[in-house]
Amino acid sequence: MPRLDRLPQINRNNLLMLPVQVNDGGPFTPLTRPLAACRLAIVTTAGLHRRGDQPFGPGEQTYRVIPADTPPADIVQSQTSLGFDRTAIMRDLNISFPVDRLREMVAQGTLGGVAPRHYSFMGAQRDVKRIEQETGPDVGRLLREAGVEAALITPT
Amino acid sequence: MLARALETAGIATTAISMVREHSEKTKPPRALFVPFPFGHALGRPDDPGLQHRVLRAALDLLAEPAGPVLRDFPDDAEPGDQPPAPAQASGIAITSTVPDDPALETAQIRQYHEQWVARGGGRTTFGLAGVPATRFRGVVRFLQAFAAGEEADMEERPADLPLADFIRYCADDWKTLYWEGRMAMKPAAGGDEIARWFWGETAAGQVLRRVRDRLDASADARWKAAAFGVAR
């Protein structure tokens, strides 16, 4: 969804009034090789991180690094938003952070490889200037340095 | 905007979109709109088949030579019977059967939470505040005192962490004990059902309503922001 017309009016209005960016096209990096030859990272806006990392605070535009071999039992979520159903990720981390599914794709040969490190931001933000200008580009550079060509961006 | 920053750095991105109306405006380079409730980006927990289909549809967009591309996941039906978003505290009536001792209630819930952790091979999303579940009685007393308007703090709060943020992490951990404990008690319970139980029937829910009220009444923006993350 949630299809907005199926949401209660108060939720629908909150979402429609969120000051989202209006863009007209933008940067585009074509993938020059098939996925089966590429290394992919997850960049999530679900506010996930390792237990013991500093949790996300309100309006925070920094990121957390999640090494690909982090056991699911060590991953927690400090997303500020209350507008989503937390039971899904409590039951199965893959609902927003599909590490097991990606590993299965690599084993099947449909994905070349998984990045050594994934990255996590907190979504549902109004001011995203620092993500645009500093922390987002930082993550892009770190991914390139790790030989990553493609990223899957997942929400909570 | 995250996608644009990554594309500029030379990374091809594909995003899962939960709100089509937003993606139509932000125009990420490649996005798959999915018709699922918030919290269910890849469809349904413990359903690898559906998750693989969503993943495949999102990753297929990486082959697109130009963008922006916004595609709809073909399944129109929402998985399961979950509403698009769970009910919020302000929309849930408080029942007449709320227990009066949140510490005792929490001790009982913790037994179920231990079952949850054991069943899941040690997995829990508990652990933001840094106070272990075995010492959670202290957190309950702290939140009760704060809710009652007292000067409350805990020695476990790091000196550089604002009190309001610490309160929010404590509240999140408290909710996690109850949410995961409830799923051990009632494995089929959905998020909306658990939210209605927590805010309507538990002593913990009533303490957190008052914690939220005190935070929200403050003129301090940090306190107000924390209130928004505790209850709405």
Image (cartoon, coloured by chain):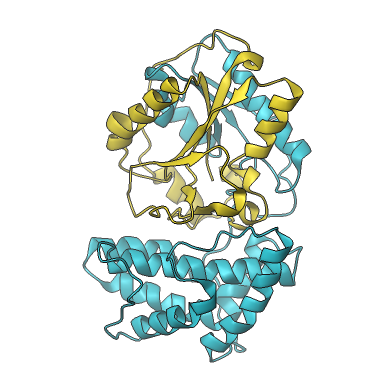
The answer to whether residue B103 is visible is yes
Residue at image coords 37%, 70% = B167
Q: Quadrant of the N terminus of chain B?
A: top left
| Quarter where residue B179 is shown | bottom right
Q: Quadrant of the C terminus of chain B?
A: bottom left
Relative to the observer, which residue lies in front, A68 or B30?
A68
Residue B91, above or below A151: below
| Quarter where residue B128 is shown | bottom left
Relative to the observer, which residue lies in front, B35 or B106?
B106
Of all residues, the one furthest to the bottom in this rendering is: B100
Q: Is residue B44 left or right of residue A151?
A: right
Chain B, hue in figure: cyan
Q: Whole-percent x and y of residue B206? A: 49, 80
Looking at the rendered structure, the number of numbered marks drawn on it comes to: 0
Residue A21, above or below B231: above
Q: Is residue B123 left or right of residue A128?
A: right
| Quarter where residue B185 is shown | bottom right
Chain A, hue in figure: yellow
Residue at image coords 60%, 13% = B63
Residue B13, above or below A131: above
